[in-house]
Structures are given as C-alpha cells and as structure tokens.
Amino acid sequence: MKYNRLFLVSFLAAASSWLLPCTAGAGSPAKRLKVDTHSLAQYVDPLIGTAHCRWFHFTPGARPFGMAKPAPSTNGHLGNKWGWEATGYDYRDQSIEGFPCLHEFQVGGIVLMPAVGKLVTVPGPLEMNAPGYRSRFDRKDEYATAGYYSVLLKDHGVKAELTATPRVAFQRYTFPAGKESRILFDIGNRQGESGAVEDAEVKLTADGRIEGWVRTLPEYVKKYQPDASVTMYFSAVTDAKPTGYGTFKGAVVSNGSRESAGVGAGLYLTFQTKEQEAVTVKVGLSFTSVANARLNLQTEAASLTFDKAKQEAADQWEEYLGRIRVETPNRQDKVKFYTGLYHVLLGRGLASDVNGAYPRNDGSVGQIPLLKGKPKHNFYNTDAAWGAQWNLAQVWALAYPEYYSDYISSHLLVYKDTGWLADGIACSRFVSGVGTNLLSAILSGAYQCGIRDFDVNLAYEASLKNELDGVDRPLGAGKVDTDLFVKYGYVPHQEKGDGPDEAFMFSASHTLEYAYSAWTVAQWAGQLGKTDDYAKLMDLSKGWERIYDDSLNFVRPRKADGSFVDDFDPMQVWRGFQEGNAWQYTFYVPHDVKGLVSKVGADVFNQRLDSIFTVSRKLIFSGGKEVGAFAGLQTLYNHGNQPCLHISWLFNEAGRPSLTQKWVRAILDEFYGVEGIHGYGYGQDEDQGQLGAWYVIASLGLFDVKGLTDTEPSFALGSTLFDKVTIKLNKRYYKGDEFVIKAANNNKQNLYVKQFRLNGKPCKETRIPFSKIVSGGLLEVEMQDTPVDRY
C-alpha cells in the first residue's frame, strides 16, 4: 500500500486541522445458498471468506463450540511457517487432500481420506502433477452449511459427507462398486496450524477399533512455551467390516500390519463395496487420552447414525442461531448476518471430555469439578482475546452468557495451574496471539454484565495480577513489559531489545492497550471496595495521555527519558505499533473518549474522523482488493484488524451519531461480502469469529466502545440494518424473555435515525443500559434519509 507522502507531510505541518480529501467506494454482488429453506441455516454460507483463510475458519461439519470439527482440506499438509498464515481450505484450490477432524488455533489433525484403486499413501502436490491420494472436485458438487458438508471426489467417484456431535466426528463415504475401496487414516503428518509432528501412533485393535494419537509442535507453542507440545487422541469405529488392512509411513506400506508409530504413521482399511454403498466412520476425539476419546464416542454416539447426528447438529445450530432472529427482505444482509453469527458460534471449541477431564498446562490431565455427576463447566481452546471486547464479548454477553461464563472458567483453570492468565491457549499450552493480554477486560465485562457464576474472587485476583505484575512473567502470559508500564506510567520505546518483537518493539500500542485494560479492572476494583487498587489502576489508565504528542495530535512512542522518538511517521507500521500505525492507534482510548476529543475539540475531532472514513472507503475500509491478512496495515483505517474496530462508533461519543450511522452502514455493506474471496474484506483474518461478531452486533445498531466494562455497562445506539430483531434472553442470567428492535421506514436510503423510543418513551440519549436490554422490552427506531444528531 503506497500513500502520497507529500500529502502526509503537508498534513503533519497543519495537523491541527485533522482533515483529509474525499473519495468514494462500491459494494459487491451476492451468492445464493443451497440449504433447507425452512431453517436459519439457509442464510449460513461457510464458504464465504475461504480464500486465504485461517485453519479454523472453514469447518462446516462442526457443532456450536464443538471439539469435533471435521472439514475438507485442500492444502493443510503444507502447514505454515509462523503458525498464523492461511492454510487448510482455500476457495481457489480445486482438489481435496483429506478430511481432518480437529481445527483449532494451533491444533489440527486426525485426517481421514477415502480412495479407490491402487493404494497411494501420500496426499501429493496441490497441482496434482505427481502421485497422491488427493482428488479433484467441482463447486457444483460441493455443499456446505452449518453442521453438514458433502462433496463428490471426482478422481475416486466417492461422495464424502461430514457432521458431528460435540466430541465425535462423523465421516460417511459412498463408494462405487469395487474391491479396492479404502479409507486412509493419515495421523502422523503436519496439518494446518498444528506444526511439525514429534511422534504419532495408530493401530487396529482386536475388536476392530482404529485408535491412536499424534503429538505436534505448534509454532506458537514453541515460541510461548518452549519444550511443550500438543497431543490429540482418537478412537474410531466403522459400520462395515474391512476385507483388508495395513499401515504406512509416508510412501512405505506394510500390508497386513496392525500398528504404526512415528512421524508419518498411518493406517488403511480396504472394503469390497457395491455400487453406492456407504461406509460411516465415527471418530471419538480427546485432548487427554485414547481412553477418554473412546468414552466420548461411547457417551455421545454409540448408537447414533450419521443421519441422526446430522439432524441433531442441524437442530442445535437452529437453536443457537435463533437466539438472534433478524427480519429483512434483503437476503444478502441475512446471509452476512447469519454467516457472521455462525463464525461466532463455531470458534473457540471444546477441549474437555464428557467426564470433565481436561489437558493441563504442564501436560498432565486435570479434572473439572463435578456437580451431580457432570462437569460444572466446559473447558475451551481459544485464540487470543486481542480486540474481543469489541465483538465476541458483546455478542456472548447478549445472547450466549453461559458460554461466556465457561470461557472465563476455562481461563481460571489455567490460572490456577500456572499462576497466570494465559490469553490464547491450545490444550492449556500458552499460545499468546500477539504477546499482549486483554483477558482482564473480558473478565471485567462479564462481571459488569451480571455474569458471575464463576469464581469471582479468583477472577479479580487474576485480572489484577495481569495488570500489575511483571516479575518473572512468562512470555506466554503476554505483557512482558508490564513492569515498565507500572514504573513509568507508559511503556518506554526501545529501538532494539531482547526476545521477540512484542517484548520491546510495540511501546505505544502496548501503552494504549494496558491503559484501557487497567481502567476496566479499576471499575471492578471500585465496586469491590478495593480503593488502593482502584487508585493505582486509574492512574495507569491515563497512560495514553503520557504518549500523546499535542504538537502533532497523534499518540507517539516515547522513550524512558521522556522524549518522543525522532523521525516519526504516523503511517509507519511496527515501530511502536503492533499491526497498525499512529493514524489508527491514536483513537485507541475507548475508556476516555471525551478526554481524547478534548485534545482538539469535538468539531475538529469529528472532521478528522469523517475524512479518514471518506478516504478509507476507496480501499473498502482496509487494504482494497489485495488478498492478505496484513493488507490494510499501512492505511488510515483497517477494518480487517482489531485495533480499529471501535473507531466508527466514536462519533456517537463526540456528538455526531449520524456519522456513526453513516459509516457503520457503509462498512457493513462494502467491507463485508458474500463470496469466497470477498467475505471478510479480501482475504482478511476473520480471527475465530471476531469480524463476524462485529457485523452481528453492529448491524443490530448496538455497540459499546468500552466493551461493556463500565460499572453500569450500556450499548450505544446506531442504525439497525434490519426491520425487526428479536433477541432471546437466557433466563438463567437475565430477567427478560426477549428484547425486540423494530425499525420503521428502513431501507438502504433511509440509513439515519430520526427517533429512538424505548418501551414507548423517546430516548434523548443514543445509549441504552445493558440492564434494560436484558430485562426485556422494545426499542423502536424510526428511520429517514437525512441525518439527525440531537434526540
């Protein structure tokens, strides 16, 4: 991305004006789905955004928040160099190499693949210019929806189908007639984000089970918890008796062998099939042991058929998707909404067994406490919480508080096991997404929203330590510069340092993040009567002011001696700013927007922000049509990455709600698409539901820049995209049954709000307390085509 440097120089010379030139943008066409028209799943298209997507993004066979996530892989065996790059399934590829059962952040494997004819035990290259068991496929023969996937493998003439229970992957293969119909279990090879294989084992037991495990070395585990590994276990059964079997390691085959071990270990079964004969494989999964994988299979699927499992998956998806029901004649908006909500519910899946066993950080097996014979909560794998306060946490709090609670309890288990909040976890191993740690804000938000059925005292203790303790802090807990932040009140900038980049290179963005999270815990401390904690945290929350350069009206990296860095370029990425620049991060003061606005005054603030969005629209609010996770880093606004996700809502805080209404609508319509390439921007990193969750909450016309962390959390009001929204509330946590939003005169032209009425009474403020929403009620929104800023 190149910018007019003369313009930027001129801008800096007159920074107080905060204005930019104007441009325009455009949207994109829609794609229709082939799904049951009586279900909300008709609006879920898992193929959206699958060009250049992460390993965990495309798993249509999964249940909501499930462990078993069966999906096709087109290039998963290639892995990736750094652990985060796109791998697994790519919409642009034309062949499939297998169907892995596990897809999580830094976790992946247990691959099955049907084949016919001559035995081949390596997947072969993507281009299919050398032998391999992979097969070509056509889009017309592929079907994907929430909880089910099918495809015709052209080179084998086999139809493959996938579905799941929470911990059991179902794979059904319909073969042509033949004596050499096979199912390969490719266990000991790299898959997606899982990293290199350290060891593996697979065997055919005397009673016909296929069981084993694979131990991998994910790149993030190697970085954040050296000498640790991730192990995946399985126990599988078939509903047909094989006529033959054998094992393999790479291309080396051992016919009649029942067991294989080591890197590359695999096993195959041979069947004699009639025309259109189906063979179903049930694969029980676990992160603790083969025995627990077997138990998970027995408990969830012992007598379950594929079709019954498929129906149960569809029913569960319908219930989860139906907690937020939107109505509009615009099908494309519904597809974006429910596909976004699908990704919210898909990501960050189960890691504990039916008996409450879970993988501990030290590699041993822990036990979740039982209540009436069942685990009190689940344990989940998860990518980092970086930016989740502006998307996932708000959707969880509103419609899925029981998951939010379990998510926190999962992290508290790791805290009890290690003494630190771990941010990202892969089977409890430290896999900090970006080397920071915003979990404190996520925990604080749950408490403020009234979700408190976890160990509140332990959660506060962990959050306070996360904000203040830098002594012997492991890299995997993130924020290794916490001691400097506490000492100086900001993180001093260093051009060079020890350790990875996040240990020293991102002083300004760390200061902003730490100031915000300190503020969130301060509100919690105040409620608990922790006056000393409150005072200290509130002082740290002002860290943003200590790096604000009044002469330029930008946040700017500052050295330990108090001087700002020289040769400052506000468009420069990586020097002081992680995955962003000063243009973007200057607005990272969600807890004190009024203080930020006061630096230049509301008029100048709004003019600057408006001009930024005007320019950014030409680049589709990110990096244009460049396909890549980092395409929008060197831009004024990048909706494809977390640091910017609150910015369009700042107009509400600065007296111009009509501009929030205008630009949020534009982002919803133009950044988000319904195609394989144009889905979440162009090849942007959807980050386990984060971009999808932003679409969901913003399209309802609700958002909180503070992440619902205030002592009386509230949603800012915006322009709802839908004619009617019905949010089903969880009675275990909230008083109300449902909250309804109705929009009158709503269409693409009438994007501005004329009036808000809550339970029949006009709203003078563009904000509603969270407590009133979850008490149930009706919000009426009258739309028009002209902007209004006073209500």
Image (tube, helix red, strand yellow):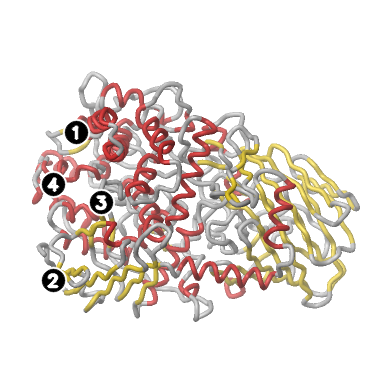
Label number found at residue 18:
4
Label number found at residue 786:
2
Residue position for label 3: 647
Q: Residues within 10 Å of mark 2 (few under 14, many from 20)?
A: few
Q: CA distance from mark 4 to mark 3?
A: 15 Å
Q: Which comes before the other along the chain, label 4 or label 2? A: 4
- Front in this rendered view, residue 542 or 296: 296
The amino acid type, in three-letter code, at marker 4 is: Trp
**Disc 3, SS:** helix
Q: Quadrant of residue 515?
A: top left
Q: Residue at x 22, y 75 (%)?
A: 749
- Front in this rendered view, residue 658 or 181: 658
Q: Which comes before the other along the chain, label 1 or label 4? A: 4
Q: Residue at x 23, y 63 (%)?
A: 718
Q: Quadrant of residue 119?
A: bottom right
Q: Position of residue 39 (x, y in %)?
A: 50, 77
- CB of mark 2 within 8 Å of CB of mark 1? no
Left-right relation of 437 to 286: left
Q: Position of residue 180 (x, y in %)?
A: 85, 66
- Front in this rendered view, residue 226 or 19: 226
Q: What residue occupies the far top of the structure in this picture?
A: 561
